[in-house]
Image (spheres, helix red, strand yellow):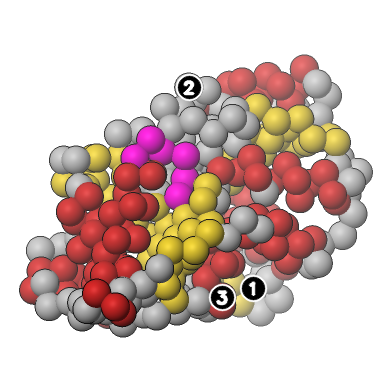
Amino acid sequence: MSLFGSSGVRGVVNDGMTPELACRIGMAVGSDAGNVVIGTDSRTSGPMMEAAVSSGLMACGCQVYSCGLVTTPTLAEATRCMDAGVMLTASHNPPEYAGIKLWNPDGMGFSVSQSDKIEQLVSSRKFRLKPWDKVGQRHVLNDVPEMHARRILAGVGKAKLKVVVDCANGPAFNITPIVLQRMGCKVVTINSNPDGHFPGRMPEPTEENLGDLRNAVVSMNADVGIAHDGDADRMVAFDDKGQYLGGDQLLALFAKRYAKKKVVVTVDASMAIDDYVDAKVVRTRVG
């Protein structure tokens, strides 16, 4: 059995990615964790999957803290004070997909060895189930996006820009526009209503899917356009002339500005980064 890919577990809802599997993954995580935070993107399967994973966690005695509809970076931030985090998202995949990403308190995703351990428990079903009087409880966290926004704002300065943000009908609506506004930007949003059918565009932020954003940036004389994927752990951009800047181009720009001695990129990142930045480029596996 091989559940985990480069970024968690994904599959079509009720055809591979079922509530039963989600519950078993919850029991596997709960067998080694006491406090777990859980969040979802805007997919229609989110409430179902959250209920299933939470049931598995609580069956093993976990205290489950639900932060509702949040981005993956927000969930990772909330995991800092927990034993683990569970993000229910299929990222950039089409709406019929669901997924589970697991996080450590240091903001890193589960390692290969941790993922292997979860797979073994799911397969063997040797979970550490608790008796009736020791099962966990569910708690609700209402202020997680606000806490994340404050942490970001503590490390950035002011900006007087006009920005168009495409939230991809996902949870980016409750973090990116708010942070930019508080920085001093004038912000216009599109696709900012969370909707798991993704009526505005598909969650993959390819240039072909972002025609509305390009047109908005140019027609509104904006300084920049920003687009997220379905769980907002990725962004692409358009400049003020409507030129698309993909992940590799943005990575090169950020590395050029901030890297002093060394920058780490994934193995699939463009080789152009090596030519563009002055720092040493180190490549690592995806995920």
Which residue corresponds to the image point at 16% horizontal and 46% vertical from the top-left? 16
Which residue bears the numbered disc 3? 80
Disc 2 on helix, strand or loop?
loop
The secondary structure that dominates the magenta segment is: loop
First along the sequence among labels 1 and 2: 2
Q: Bounds of the magenta span?
A: 40-45
Distance of mark 3 from mark 1, alpha carbons? 30 Å
- Three-letter amino acid code at the position of disc 1: Ala
Q: Residues within 10 Å of mark 1 (few under 14, many from 20)?
A: some
Residue 245 found in image quarter: top right
Q: Residues within 10 Å of mark 3 (few under 14, many from 20)?
A: some
Mark 1 vs mark 2, foreground winner is: 2
Q: Nearer the viewer, residue 109 or 217?
A: 109
- Three-letter amino acid code at the position of disc 2: Pro
- Three-letter amino acid code at the position of disc 3: Arg
Q: Position of residue 84 (x, y in %)?
A: 43, 74
Q: What mark, if any, has residue 199 been given in the picture?
A: 2
Which residue corresponds to the image point at 46% horizontal and 28% vertical from the top-left? 198
Q: Position of residue 216 (x, y in %)?
A: 71, 21
First along the sequence among labels 3 and 1: 3
Residue 145 belongs to magenta span: no
Q: Nearer the viewer, residue 86 or 246?
A: 86
Q: Is residue 263 visible?
A: yes
Which residue bears the numbered disc 1? 279
**Is residue 200 toward the left or the right of residue 7 in the image?**
right
